[in-house]
Image (spheres, rainbow, N blue to C red):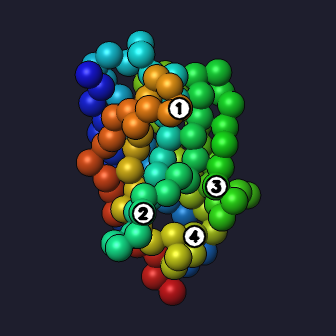
Amino acid sequence: QVQLVESGGGLVQAGGSLRLSCAASGSIFSINYMGWYRQVVGKQRELVAVISSGGSTNYADYVKGRFTISRDNATVYLQMNSLKPEDTAVYYCNAKSILILPGYWGQGTQVTVSS
């Protein structure tokens, strides 16, 4: 089992920045991928960014150049710059051993970007 605890969400004006953190505990030896997803009420949860244990990253097109994912052992970060109102969502941390598996989820942290 893996437990994920997120922090860093909040309210920010458009153009501002936020940094999300997610600390993993438990069977962290099984984790190969850590990532961030987001969900708006009434819509499906969507991938924001993922990072492998080797440091390879993948971003959704709508955050490329604005968001940066990084990882320090069992903690993953999401630096979000140039935030837009459409970035408003609940952001969830995810950890998994294999990409095709659902993996483990954090409780979610609200990010609200005001115009």
Q: What residue type is labelled 4?
A: Leu
Q: Which amino acid does label 3 sit on?
A: Ala
* The disc label shown at residue 107, or none: none
In the rendered view, does 6 fall on the left or right side of 61?
left
Q: Which element is circle 3 on?
A: loop
Mark-to-mark CA distance, 4 and 1: 27 Å
Near mark 1 (Cα within 10 A), the count class, few <14, some 14-19 or many ≥20, is: few
Which quadrant of the figure has residue 104?
A: top left
Where does label 4 land, which residue?
Answer: 83
Q: What residue type is labelled 2?
A: Gln
Q: Which of marks 2 and 4 is nearer the N terminus?
A: 2
Q: Earlier in the sequence, mark 4 or mark 1?
A: 4
Q: Vertically, is 95 above or below 45?
A: above
- Residue at image position (51%, 70%) is 87
Q: Residue 5 at what x, y percent from top left?
A: 29, 39
Mark-to-mark CA distance, 3 and 2: 14 Å
Q: Which element is circle 4 on?
A: loop
Q: Earlier in the sequence, mark 1 or mark 2?
A: 2
Query: Between tags 2 and 4, which lies in front?
Result: 2
Q: Vertically, is 6 above or below 39?
A: above
